[in-house]
Amino acid sequence: MRKVAVHALIALATGGVMSTPALCRAYELDPQLDCKSNAHDYISQLLNSRYIEPNPMRVEANSINAFRPIRGSNLTAFGFRVYAVLGYEHDDAIFRKGNGEPISDSAYGVVVNGPAETVESRVREAGSRAIVKQVVPLLITAVLCDGR
């Protein structure tokens, strides 16, 4: 009986670890940031895999929704830790609309911890045409695929 209980606990623990994002290694978003997708596909995949919180932590006036990575998800983009995942798609229930003019029909990206010059260099090396914008000098940079 004791052996069965131990095996059951091991199965539960293993199943719990397998159903959550990988805790030991980073999940790289580089391939999705090639700007060949759309916000719905990009965000829904991260939601379904439980890498980001389902409700945005912030909605900008231009309707960009900022989603917080789930604790322990260890998201990276171009070698930098992801602070927030960005997205907006017109008439899509995943996203909330801001009080201003939407940025475009579909836009998605990330906010990373890293200097804009270094981030931009890595984005270009990867062949992405994403827009790179400094958010906080020397610290935080946004990488955005805009569907315009």
Image (cartoon, rainbow, N blue to C red):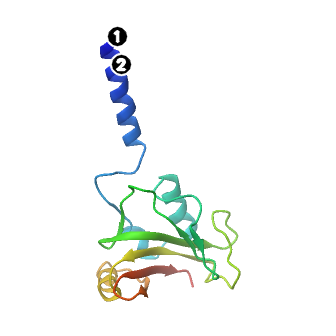
Whole-angstrom CA distance, mark 1 to mark 2, is 6 Å
Image quadrant holding the C terminus, namely bottom right
Please indicate whether residue 35 sits to the left or right of residue 126 in the image. right
Q: How crowded is mark 2: few (under 14 residues within 10 Å), some or many (20 or more)?
A: few
Looking at the picture, how far across and down is residue 112, in whole percent?
39, 75
Whether residue 28 is situated above or below residue 72 in the rendered picture = below
Please indicate whether residue 51 sits to the left or right of residue 11 in the image. right
Please indicate whether residue 64 sits to the left or right of residue 21 in the image. right
Residue under numbered circle 1: 1
Q: Which residue is drawn at 55% across and 80% down?
A: 147
Residue under numbered circle 2: 5
Q: Which residue is drawn at 32% across and 14% down?
A: 2
Q: Residue at x 39, y 57 (%)?
A: 73
> Which residue type does callout 2 highlight?
Ala
Looking at the picture, how far across and down is residue 93, in whole percent?
68, 63
**Tag 1 near tag 2, CB within 8 Å:** yes
- Callout 2: helix, strand or loop? helix
Please indicate whether residue 23 sits to the left or right of residue 133 in the image. left
Whether residue 1 is situated above or below residue 132 in the rendered picture = above
Looking at the picture, how far across and down is residue 137, in whole percent?
38, 89
Query: Residue 123 sits in which quadrant?
Result: bottom left
> Which residue type does callout 1 highlight?
Met
Looking at the picture, how far across and down is residue 72, in whole percent?
38, 55
In the image as oriented, which residue stretches furthest toward the top? 1
Q: Residues within 10 Å of mark 1 (few under 14, many from 20)?
A: few
